[in-house]
Every structure is written in structure tokens, then in C-alpha cells.
Image (tube, rainbow, N blue to C red):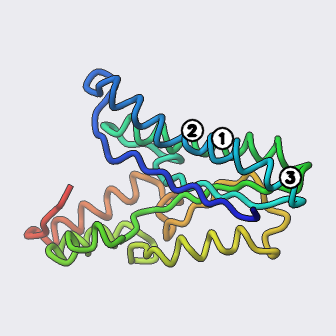
């Protein structure tokens, strides 16, 4: 076993600590960090036997920054980054590199119909990104391929934001710019 990509997704359960049920919390922890822990538990012995390997855990920009109302999702994605760093430190001497990818908004097959139906909302979201577009699955695939390549042989324990520059912006500046966008496009439909 040379490469493991952990892409566990617990769903978008919204709510704060008061609103969220313990059952939903436990489910998210099982599908998220616990599943990634299990993958490492059973993959590492095979990687050691083969002389090393690469592991990429999928986190999110929500693991780097937070927004109210997304407690469990952001806790899971932050835990993925912590798990990644610990695994990298632990198994680096065995030739195992572990990194995380933190996607921004990616237009997957699941969300594409929503954006096709609401092009104005799509333009609003695109305007939040310095590259003025949302991500594609290939953007994430390319980042994973790079992290698993020999070109990335000296990279481990890192959380790579693949987000079109979303997380590098000062929030007050983007807030003002997006407020202007809304004023200029009053008929924009917002899907969230």
C-alpha cells in the first residue's frame, strides 16, 4: 500500500452546541476523525512493510476558519488537521508522509445542479474568491497527486488550502466588497 486518501464526509449538520444533538455529534466524529484514525491504524503497518507511503486527509477551509452555526463540521475538519500533523510526526521516520488538503467551495456533481439553477448566486460566490471562480474536483485531485508525488517528498504535516485564495483575505475587506456586489446585483438569489 503506497497511497491512502481519506475523504470522509459527515454531512452538513448545522447547529451550535445547544442545538446539535449528541447523536449527530457522535455520527460526525465517527465518520470524520474516527474513520481517518482507523484508516491510519490499518494502513500504516502495510506502508511500513513496503518502506513508506503517503496519506492525504481531506479537511476544508472550515478547518482553518470558522463560521457560526457549523460547530460539528468545523470541529471535524479542524480535528483532521490535528490528526494529520500528529500522524506526520509519528510516522515520518518510517518514510510515511501525511498531509491534509483544505478545499474551498468545490462544484461537485452533487452541488452543480444548484448552481446551474441559480447562476446569479454562483456569480456571488465566485466573486468571493481572488481567482473569481469556484473550485473543481480536478483542482483537489491535482493537489492530492502533487502531495503524493516525489516532487513533494519534503512536505509532510501540512494543511494545504486549495481555495482560490479565499482564506488569505481580510474579512472586513471582503465584506465591504461583497456588500457592494449585493447593491449592484439586487436580484441575486442566495442559496444559503
Q: Residues within 10 Å of mark 2 (few under 14, many from 20)?
A: some
The residue lying at 29 percent from left, 27 percent from top is 20
* Front disc: 3 or 1: 3
Left or right placement of residue 183 versus residue 78 in this view: left
Q: Is residue 25 above or below residue 93?
A: above
Determine the secondary structure under disc 2: helix
Question: Mark 3: which secondary structure?
Answer: helix
Of 71 and 86, the residue lying toward us: 86
**Tags 1 and 2 in contact by the CB under 8 Å rule?**
yes
Quadrant, the C terminus: bottom left
Q: Kindly identify which residue carries mark 1.
A: 83
Q: Residues within 10 Å of mark 1 (few under 14, many from 20)?
A: many
User: SS at mark 1?
Assistant: helix
Q: Residue 146: percent from the left, percent from the top?
A: 69, 74
The Cα atoms of the two marked residues, 1 and 2, are separated by 6 Å
Q: Is residue 73 above or below residue 167?
A: above
Q: Which residue is mark 3?
A: 48
- Tell me the quarter of the picture where residue 135 sits: bottom left
Amino acid at each position: 500500500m503506497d497511497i491512502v486518501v481519506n475523504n470522509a464526509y459527515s454531512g452538513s449538520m448545522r447547529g451550535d452546541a445547544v442545538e446539535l444533538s449528541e447523536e449527530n455529534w457522535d455520527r460526525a466524529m465517527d465518520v470524520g476523525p474516527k474513520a481517518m484514525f482507523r484508516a491510519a491504524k490499518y494502513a500504516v503497518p502495510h506502508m511500513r512493510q513496503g518502506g513508506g507511503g503517503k496519506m492525504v486527509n481531506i479537511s476544508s477551509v472550515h478547518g482553518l476558519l470558522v463560521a457560526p452555526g457549523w460547530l460539528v463540521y468545523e470541529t471535524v475538519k479542524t480535528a483532521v488537521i490535528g490528526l494529520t500533523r500528529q500522524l506526520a510526526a509519528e510516522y515520518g521516520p518510517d518514510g510515511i508522509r501525511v498531509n491534509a488538503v483544505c478545499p474551498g467551495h468545490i462544484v461537485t456533481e452533487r452541488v452543480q445542479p444548484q448552481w446551474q439553477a441559480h447562476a446569479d448566486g454562483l456569480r456571488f460566490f465566485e466573486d468571493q474568491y481572488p481567482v473569481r471562480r469556484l473550485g473543481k474536483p480536478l483542482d483537489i485531485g491535482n493537489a492530492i497527486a502533487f502531495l503524493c508525488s516525489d516532487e513533494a517528498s519534503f512536505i509532510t504535516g501540512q494543511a494545504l488550502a486549495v481555495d482560490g485564495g479565499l482564506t488569505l483575505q481580510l474579512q472586513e475587506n471582503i465584506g465591504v466588497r461583497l456588500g457592494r456586489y449585493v447593491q449592484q446585483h439586487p436580484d441575486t438569489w442566495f442559496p444559503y
